[in-house]
Image: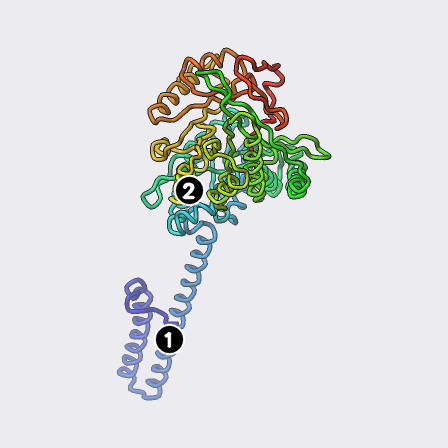
Amino acid sequence: MSVTSPRKFGRNKKQWFFVGGLAIANLFYAAFVFWLLGDESQWLGLVQLAMIALISALSFAIFYRFNKREIEMKKAFEDLSANDKLTGLSTRAKFSQTINTYLSNSKKTGPFALMLLDIDRFREVNTTLGYGGADQLLKEIGNRLVHFTGQRAECARLSGNEFAILVRYDGSGEDLQQRMQSLFTALYRPYICDARSMEITFSGGISLYPDDSLEGSELAHCAQFALQRAKQQGHNKIYCYEEGADEKIHDLQLLSQDMDRALKNNEFKLFFQPQFSFATGEQVGFEALIRWEHPQRGLISPGDFIPIAEQNGFIIPLSEFALLEACKAAVSWHNPLRVAVNLSPVQIQHIDIVELTEHALQETGLDPARLELEVTESLFINISDGTAEMLQKLQKMGISIALDDFGTGYSGLNYLSNFPFDKLKIDRSFVKDLTHDQGAMAIISAVIGMAKSLDMRITAEGIDNKEVLEILKIAGCHEAQGFLLGKPRDINLVPGVEMETSHTHSGNELNSRHDTKAA
């Protein structure tokens, strides 16, 4: 290793001027003594002294240079270990130190929240964008987190798609909610990667100091459990840690292990909820809803097991079961009613839906015109050309495609114009507030007008009282679905009824939450 190079000489010229000056001074001193005394023996001694001084100076310069390089390398290594190279955020090591600093200065810093964030479906995002595009996305997320950080927050990138945030707040739930809302507003804006707009969702877990723990490692443990809970409940969920969360997660893990046995033992059942025409009052179809009749736990809400199935991959055989059984049931009905089956985004991304649907239709003999497949907005967050092509093939087969739970996702309205859906289903979260929320009515009116201009039929879900039913009829909805018109029923109890003759159910039945879709 050379001490320096010509290019670097200018940076270190002071030390080399010092070495050269010292050597020249010694040589001049030796020459002066020889001229003054004329003694050859003294001359040789002074020359030796000058050489020793020169060697000493060179040794000092070399030591100084190596020592400076070592200091610079150590500082560079510390900077590298403290800051993520891609995003510029803190690394895991530095973030751990920051947590300890917060804890040691807790009287000064006050309460704070620790949030862990994971990018949903990052593997699919990586596949869609490629490594370069994915890196660009991570940089942009880092930039938004940097803008979010200030005197009351610290951010870090812990691993490939996992981020952490420390947020100070005044101890009130309102202040924490405002801080988190500011963060979500920043993170959920569309991202531009490789000249394409993408909308990304996150799963998150939050723990609070001092409520959940006084120790840094325990706070991280609590936030990690909350994050796992969020993932098990599906994508785009944020959970705060709750006491006993460990037991809940263990319980969900047991449910996950029971699923394969449950399918083999016919514990999953399909129930059917009727759909009616506003124009005629006649029943036009059913939506297939899946239930799990567990031998020990009894009836398990789909809201508890569907997200787990999506996470562990069991949603694929479960959705295949639902599609085949729904087609079999529809063929057995006396009236040629339509049957609607939900498609999971996980299912669409991992198997050939066109082939699966063709197999179900051929095996059961169901007319494709009587089959409706429902997809949610989450499918279109990272839509690929292959996904659009697949849905178009299904349409060409004569199958209807419905956009379900409209308004609850994060997709852009451009998907409505770019893809010719046959139907748009208004989510129950808008419908339930119609009688007392003018904003909800304005939204539904706008959605109905937009859907009609795009030649789509509109179905309103979650209708639970006659007043809402009448409002939606006047607004121009085409079809209605809800507990007021009919609860989900077993296949053996499915009649063909009309709206006027259907039974009105009690308030308790209307508020039941066991009617989640069949994936």
Camera sees residue 199: yes
Gap in Å between the C-alphas at discs 2 and 1? 83 Å
| Residue 267 image offset from top left, x and y in percent | 67, 36
> Where is residue 336 shown, x and y percent of the image?
51, 27
Residue for badge 2: 390
Which image quadrant for residue 172?
top right
Q: Looking at numbered disc 1 in the image, what kind of residue is underneath it? A: Ala
* Other-residue count near label 1 (Cα within 10 Å), few / some / many at <14 / 14–19 / ≥20: some
Q: Nearer the viewer, residue 231 or 214?
A: 231
**Lower position in the chain sequence, tag 2 or tag 1:** 1
- Given the image, on which type of amino acid does mark 2 rest? Met
Question: Residue at position x 56%, y 42% from top?
Answer: 311
Q: Residues within 10 Å of mark 2 (few under 14, many from 20)?
A: some
Question: In this figure, which residue is indicated by the disc labeled 1?
Answer: 53
**Residue at (63, 33) in percent of width and height:** 269
* Image mark for residue 151: none
Q: Nearer the viewer, residue 331 or 310?
A: 331
Left or right of 30: which side holds 282? Answer: right
- Dot in front, 2 or 1: 2
Residue 474, placed above or below residue 286:
above
The residue sitting at the left extreme is 35
Q: Is residue 104 visible?
A: no
